[in-house]
Each structure stands twice: as C-alpha cells, then as structure tokens.
Amino acid sequence: MKGLRGKRAIVTGGADGIGRAIAERFAEEGTEVVVFDIRPRAPGHVNVDITDYEAVKKAVAEAGPVDILVNNAGWDMFKPFLKTEPDFWQKIISINLVGAMNMLHCVLPGMVARGGGKVVSIASDAGRVGSSGEAVYSACKGGIISLTKTLARELASKGVRLNTVCPGVTETNMLAEFMKGAGNPEKLAEAFRRAIPVGRLGKPEDLPGAVLFLASSDADFITGQTLSVSGGMTMHG
C-alpha cells in the first residue's frame, strides 16, 4: 500500500492476536514497527502498561517521531452487567478506553507539530450494536468510536486522520477466555458461526488489510469513519 514504507508505527497490544497480525503486516510493507505491550515477547517490543499515563508518555518519547498509531490493546471477560462490580468496570474502562486516550494524548501532539499522521483505533462491533455479557466493554468501544469521530473533526485541518476498525467475532485468546467465561464455548462458537453470513469466525489475519489501508496514503481523504470487519455479522448503511 502507498505511503507506508519508511514510516514509524506504534501498535499497542501487538504481542498476540490481532495486534501481532497487524504489526507483522506493517513490517512486510517496510514500516518500522514499535510494539507496546504489557507482555513483550520479541525484539522491538516495549513493556508498557497503557493505563499508566506517565509510562505511556515516557515510552512514546523514547520511540521517536510517530507517523502511525494503532490502538489495539484491549481486554474483556463475559459477565452480565448486574453481576459485575465497580472494580471490574474500572479495569475494563482503564484498559479499553483510558489506555487509548493516554496513547492519543501522548502521540497526537507530535503528529500535529509535524503536520500529519494516521491513527487507527481497534474498537468492536460490540461498540456499534451491543453484545450480551459485554456491557462495560461495549460502552468503552462505543466511546472509542465517538472519541475518534470527535478528534477527526478537531484535527482534520492539522493533517491528522483518525478512523476506527471494528472486528466482529475473531478467534483470539481473548475470545477463548470470553467464551469460557460464558460457560458454553462450543455452543457459543457454533451460534456465532451460524450468525456470520461468510460462514466462519474471523481470524487475526482478516484485520490487517483494513488497518493498513486506513494508515496508508490511499486513505488521505478518509477520516472519522468506522469500518466493520465481521464477515457480515453486522451491516450498517
């Protein structure tokens, strides 16, 4: 894709799953990739707790000028809302919403100063249409979508483009833990498959194409948009 070679990208939560697939695809395109993860697993990975603003600020400064930010890190657990407690809410919010806000607050000033940049935040279709057992997570991902649209308006004249990609049901470790928490993983997986017109669950490798497109110069006239990558499970006109 155009305009990715030689750029520097930060991918949060890039040690596993969707984040890893995105980081590897950027590397294939000649992008310098810095992975921020609380569990770094390879060279180029930086141990960062994105819920810690000062840690994020330090890590971003050490990473150098950033052209592309992918807010991918996230966490969830299946729990009906009325069976949750405030401590659980806070954990979900800290990782899925505040963590992304920390990254944006630390990365965007440099993009503005340099006259441009691309941000792609990984939200979820749960944030677009809701999802049983994921009330707080859905609220956070809906917040990411709204935050992205607002910042896209505020920073359009500064050359910064911000968009959101919403995965549907995707085979990751987080999904496996989520389905285990629901108590019937095999039945739930089959129900998901029946609900997806394409006929299968998503894979991490299904996401990088959409993310890299929005991060590329091919998408210079696209900002504030939300793209679902769900095999048709959700459709929005």
Image: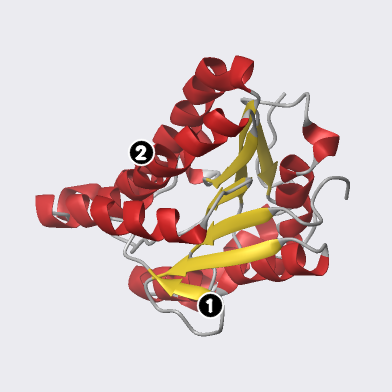
Residue at mark 1 = 186
Could you tell me residue 37's position as x and y percent? 43, 69
Q: Secondary structure at mark 2?
A: helix
Could you tell me residue 20's position as x and y percent? 61, 71
In screen coordinates, is 47 left or right of 218?
left
Report the residue at 63% width, 28% height from top.
Answer: 115
Report the residue at 56% width, 59% height from top.
Answer: 11
Q: Which mark is residue 144?
A: none
Marked residue nearer the N-terminal end (1 or 2): 2
For residue 230, above or below residue 180 = above
Could you tell me residue 56's position as x and y percent? 34, 55
Report the residue at 34% width, 45% height from top.
Answer: 102
Could you tell me residue 110's position as x and y percent? 50, 38
Q: Residues within 10 Å of mark 2 (few under 14, many from 20)?
A: many
Q: Secondary structure at mark 1?
A: helix
Report the residue at 61% width, 52% height from top.
Answer: 168
For the view shown, which residue lies furthest in the left direction? 86
The colour scheme used to paint the residues is secondary structure
Residue type, numbered disc 1: Glu
Residue type, numbered disc 2: Ala
Residue 16 shows in this picture: yes
Residue at mark 2 = 139
Between marks 1 and 2 in the image, the one whose residue lies nearer the viewer = 2
Q: How many marks?
A: 2
Nearer-the-camera pick, 102 or 148: 102
* 3D distance between C-alphas at marks 1 and 2: 26 Å
Nearer-the-camera pick, 89 or 106: 106
Residue 80 shows in this picture: no
For residue 84, above or below residue 141 = below
For residue 6, above or below residue 16 = above
In screen coordinates, is 33 left or right of 29?
left
Q: Quadrant of the C terminus?
A: top right
